[in-house]
Image: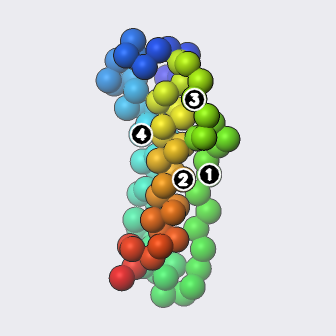
Amino acid sequence: MFGVKELFTVTADEWLEVFDANFRGAYLTASATIMELARTKGYIVLLSSGFAQTRYTGMSQYNLSKHAINRLAEWIDLGESTE
């Protein structure tokens, strides 16, 4: 699933497999729980990585998927999903 490959040498399926493994679960969990968390003033914890803020050759799919989780957390923090 995850290996060090240049951005355009990774197949679309390989790239999306990593993105799905890292981002999709966070998004689906947030999406399924956000209204109840807002109602109860609860919290959600989304796991990212320091790699979200780095650019290393051969790690684009991993880095971008973790960066997307950070942005998802920011949008949740803005309250956009609960208005």
Residue 55 bears which disc, if any? 3
Q: CA distance from mark 3 to mark 4?
A: 20 Å
Number of other residues with Cα within 10 Å of mark 3, as a class: few under 14, some 14 to 19, many 20 or more: few
Displayed quadrant of residue 40:
bottom right
For label 2, the SS is: helix
Residue that extends furthest to the left in the rendered view of this protein: 12
Q: Earlier in the sequence, mark 2 or mark 4?
A: 4
Image marks 2 and 3: residues in contact by CB distance under 8 Å:
no
Q: What is the distance, in whole Å, between disc 2 and disc 3 at their CAs?
A: 15 Å
The amino acid type, in three-letter code, at marker 1 is Leu
Of labels 3 and 4, the one closer to you = 3
Circle 1 SS class: loop
> From where the camera sits, is residue 3 visible?
no
Q: Is residue 6 visible?
A: yes
- What residue would you read off at disc 2? 70
Q: Amino acid at mark 3?
A: Arg
Q: Which residue is mark 4?
A: 20
Q: Are marks 1 and 2 in contact (CB under 8 Å)?
A: no
The answer to which of marks 3 and 1 sits earlier in the sequence is 1
Decide if residue 17 is on the left or right side of residue 70: left
- Mark 2 vs mark 3, foreground winner is 3
Residue 67 lies, in percent from the top left, at 52, 45
